Image (spheres, rainbow, N blue to C red):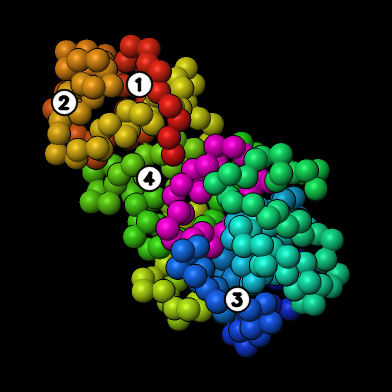
Amino acid sequence: MPDQEPVHPGVRLLGPSDVRLLADRLGIRPTKQRGQNFVIDANTVRRIAKLAGVGAQDTVLEVGSGLGSLTLALLERSPRVVAVEVDAALAAALPDTVTDFAPARRTDVTVVHADAMRVAVEQLSAATGEAPTALVANLPYNVSVSVLLHLLEISPTLRTVLVMVQAEVADRLAAAPGSRTYGVPSVKAAWYADVSPAGRVGRSVFWPAPNVDSGLVRMVRHDPPTGVARELVFAVVDAAFAQRRKMLRSALAGLAGSSAEAIRALTAAGVSEQARGEQLAVSDFVAIARALPAADVSPRH
């Protein structure tokens, strides 16, 4: 990616002392319950914004904006940021932080006080009139996959994603079939997008420092498969990985209605009945779902 200067250079980024002063002023202490680890290194958030490739055409969705470190870095490159924050105090304080550190950009940030797992797509576009086109976020470790899949599902306008998650989760999201880390998150992410690793982030750039390293994951959206419901495909994925040692003919028997029906569906899909879930690409799961008898399944992320 070419090295480009920020298009809005009048933004001042937060440093370690700024982060701690803001937290003290608000009486904020990071909590494990909400997975709060605030980035205190300006170079890191600027790197994330650059890797995300956002530009003048993008409305950026940020989840877990916290004290505003990444928000400000995104404002250097994007004309609009929609920041979703579940903590009431942090959500209320973000506009003032933008006013102090990027006064010319105050009206270009929309804060949505909401739980990202329950936010509605209408909330993301109501204030700006623009549907988000890019997701860039430092996702809370404890809910990162669920939040990511939920946002991809409710926001079909999202074309690119750059998220920071726990390093182990980053490996799982970007894993290929047959690899040790390949699993349910890998397949479900691949339903929505082409997924690739985008680098590592050390522990020292956070306050408080987490006990694990972080990883960056890039996603470029593609059109989903047609002729089959996502819920059914995801149900097949969940069943295939529920007991990893089971062959697919056994793992899918309950969903298909019987072992014989599972074998029939696998044969029709061109998948060996002795295969296991970790060997299959998302296209294989789609083929199996298409071959199954009609099923009533509840959506799961």
Q: Image point 36% across, 74% down: which residue?
A: 211
Q: Which residue is mark 1?
A: 289
Q: Amino acid at mark 4?
A: Pro
Residue at image mark 2: 250
Where is the N terminus found, in terms of image quarters? bottom right
Position in image of residue 68 (x %, y %)? 66, 70
Q: Left or right of 44: which side holds 266?
A: left
Which residues fall within the magenta stretch? 132-155
Q: Secondary structure at mark 1?
A: helix
Comparing marks 2 and 1, which lies closer to the viewer? Answer: 2
Residue sitting at x 61%, y 67%: 66
Residue shown at 19% from the left, 34% from the top? 276
The answer to whether one can see residue 221 in this image is no
- What amino acid type is highlighted by mark number 2? Ser
Callout in the foreground (2, 3): 3
Which residue lies most toward the bottom here? Answer: 17
